[in-house]
Amino acid sequence: MARTPDAITDRILRWSGVAVFLLLWETAPRAGWVDPYFAPPFSAVLGAFGRLAAEGTLASHLLISAWRGLSGLAVAVAVGVPAGFLLGRHSPRAGEALEPLLRLLSQVNPFTLLPLFLLFFGIGETAKIAVIGWVSLWPILFYTVTGARTVDPLLVKTARSLGVNGGGLCRTVLLPGALPTLFTGVRIGAGLVFFMLVAAEMLGANAGVGWLVHNSAMNFQIPRLYAGAVAIVFLGYALNRGLLTLEQALFAWREAPSEAVTGRAARHVLRPGKGGAALAAALLILLFVAGGWEVRRVNLAAVSGGHSHHGKHSLPTPERIEEEKQLEQDLNGWEPFTDGGKGK
Amino acid sequence: MKRDISIIGAIPLAVFLALWELLPRAGAIDPVFLPPLSTVVETVVGLWHGGDLQTHALVSLRRALVGFLAAVALGLPLGLVVGGWFPRLQTALEPLMELFAQANPVVLFHIIILFLGIGEGAKTFIIGWLCLWPVTFSAINGVRGADPLILKAARSLGVGRLRLFVSVVIPLAAPSIFAGLRLSAGYAFIMLIAAEMMGASSGLGWLVIQAQESYHVARIFAGAAVITVMALAVDGILKLIGLWLAPARDTEESRPLGELAANVKER
């Protein structure tokens, strides 16, 4: 994109809203307009963020959350994409027939499913991954069905008349044809994964960014709570923006008509070669393996004593465990979030 | 033809329900974990006769409705005015609004509790907050996406600014707005249950979490079923209202948990 002065002022204007908001966040608690205990100034939040990052706990939580999210999404893609092709392309009659049932299932509230999955799978990782996968399955499945249905029939017929059939047809015509729509489904699914991931970690976990926020709220570590929240908001935004940009770069040829109206210049088309694709895949696998290892470490540590996640260097000493038990008992009397209103 | 499809669609639904009834009865699945459909229905009926169901459903509906209406009352004018009259303000606010819309509501809930306590205020606020953004964005998009040809035609016919807005721009934006409203209502329901699970002493979400804590599995299923039916009903009603008030174009918006995108006509 050419950096004309016009584009730069536009950029400044775009981010002025955010800048004003951050400025207010900094000044309002300092000036005493809001209670700085409940709303610490932005710099204090950044400080807490820095401490978390320096301890290495933030990276660990992020890695664990990323692993859970990736696992859920992988399950959803592994189930949704083949099923979508089956229902959209292979047997469209079955797709039509199953529509009401699938619509019903997709409307089931994921939060009511969480207790059921906990019942079926226990409090381990499986329940969380199952509910995350469930939530992201539906957009992926439905968009794949649409994508598979709307592959240009002319292309399919041409390929058939050239003798391409079965697996070859799938790989060279159907999959590329359905990919743009499919990718939209994955993008929406990834957003839902992130939403549900944080929620699931709050309702039962011993690590992860959702747990970080929940735990901070329980212990009234307000700056840490805000630091976790800022990290989550930023991650969600980056995930959404990144996938959107990737989608537009990969499928720029399928320009939306509304953008043609706004008259923006055609985007640079990204054409990943084999190297780029391999690099992306390697990064994902690395993240997956490292995350899996970290999850295992934290869960083992939780089993063998410390009830929570203390970073790498603090082994739970007997005093510390005693202290925490006491704290927990103190908190249990009035803890507002987890007792589900039993106290009332 | 249309009838045909709905009959075919009823078959898998019936099979699903029949399996739900038969598998636990035959012992293929442990009925402790998956109670047969009839038990779940009995539980729903029992809750209804006990009066619990109506009480909690009404409490939940009221929370969702208040939050939703507040979001509409705030977001609709905001979106229409910002989208229609202040394009530069829109540019300045867009990233901020996007960040706010992206802010995970479950996380936000914890922060809102700090300010508002765990009473009704926090729950209504979080639902309203969540509903606000789809409504605002859809209003902005609807206004921005209004066909410039129609606007020019109206203007060349001497239509004044206010009149143009009321009788041309708003009808043009209506389908997009209604898509946003349905999206909002879906979010409202999901978040409502989450908020009630995290801190409440009434409502359907509380009913489910309470059942979980006392290992009353049939009640979990009953609560889940009632919540699903209510969400479907609300969505259906909004869809009908949308079709009635703004039948113009069909809009393809992604629903929170995936509108069946497969409805797109085959070429």
Image: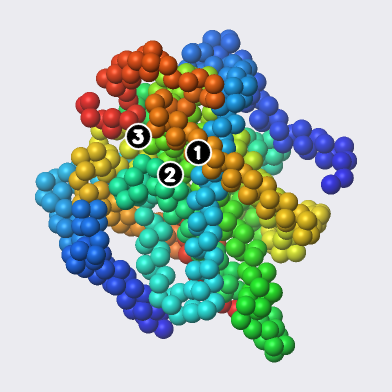
- Going by the image, does A211 lie left or right of A269? left
Q: Amino acid at mark 2?
A: Glu
The percent position of residue B229, horizontal first and vertical second, equals 30, 57
Mark 1 or mark 2, which has the lower sequence index? 2
Query: Is residue A331 toward the left or the right of residue B151 in the image?
Result: left
Q: Quadrant of residue B67?
A: top left
Q: Mark 3 against mark 2, which lies toward the viewer?
A: 2
Residue under label 2: A125
Q: Are marks 1 and 2 in contact (CB under 8 Å)?
A: yes
Q: Quadrant of the N terminus of chain B?
A: bottom left
Q: Position of residue B18 (x, y in %)?
A: 24, 70
User: Which amino acid, mark 1?
Assistant: Val
Read off the chain for label 2.
A
- Chain that bears disc 3: B
Q: Do marks 3 and 1 both belong to one polypeptide chain?
A: no
| Residue at the image point whose x is 28% and y is 55% from the top | B225
Q: Which residue is mark 1?
A: A295
Residue A331 place in picture, x, y as percent: 32, 19
- Percent position (x, y) of residue B101? 55, 40
In this rendered view, identify the residue nearer to me: A209 or A154: A209
User: Mark 3 = which residue?
Assistant: B198
- Quarter that holds the C terminus of chain B: bottom right
